[in-house]
Image: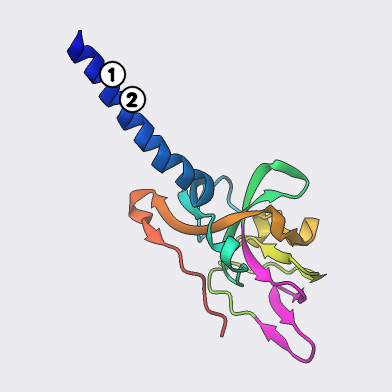
Amino acid sequence: MARFLRFIFETGRTVLIALLIVVPLRLYVAQPFFVRGASMEPSFHSGDYLVIDELSYRLRDPRRGEVVVFRYPYDPSQFFIKRIIGLPGETVKSDEGRVIVEDTDTGELLQEPYISAPTPDTFRISTGPREYVVLGDNRGASSDSRRWGVLSKDLIVGRVLVTVWPPDSLSVFAAPSYQ
């Protein structure tokens, strides 16, 4: 009987320690995310398993080119994944698939090597404070800022950190440099 009680105690202690470590990490630092749909192809495919960094945006603002997971503005129970294109206070426009970020004097044509096929979209979206323009990499199959407008920072869960599945796609995600 004493061995059984010792086993129960040791098992309970191990479970408690694991919970004290895993739960805060899962709630405040990182969480898993499964990609559903084709909106981010060719960068991410349906079924990819990602780890999302939830901590970075508590310390700094999102940057252009980062891929974020967020709550869909019209149904916060749904999670979407898109790339940040426009930052607060900017105007993003597209003319025949060429995305241009405007500021006060000049416009910056974004080089987007992650796009497999540009779409002939024409749009113009301006952001306010704490608002972002997000677009899918597969523009022809993406519901994004072109359809439903700007994304509030409050809806962003975190940024893609690592692809862990499938195994041949194991990699740390790095946002492109637009400079």
Q: Residue furthest top?
A: 1
Magenta span: chief secondary structure: strand
- Colour mode of the rendering: rainbow
- Going by the numbered disc 1, the residue's amino acid type is Ile
- Please name the residue that numbered disc 2 is placed on: 12
- Please name the residue that numbered disc 1 is placed on: 8
How far, Cα to Cα, is label 1 from label 2?
Answer: 6 Å
10 Å crowding of disc 1: few (<14), some (14-19), many (20+): few
On screen, 79 above or below 89?
above
Seen in the image, is 124 located left or right of residue 20? right
Residue 70 location (% of width, % of height): 64, 52
Residue 176 location (% of width, % of height): 52, 74
Residue 17 location (% of width, % of height): 35, 36
Which of 145/33 is in front? Answer: 33
Q: Are marks 1 and 2 in contact (CB under 8 Å)?
A: yes
Q: Residue furthest front?
A: 2
Q: Residue at x 74, y 72 (%)?
A: 88
On screen, 40 above or below 126?
above
Seen in the image, is 20 located left or right of residue 87? left
10 Å crowding of disc 2: few (<14), some (14-19), many (20+): few
Q: Is residue 41 visible?
A: no
- Going by the numbered disc 2, the residue's amino acid type is Gly
Q: Does 62 lie within the magenta span? A: no
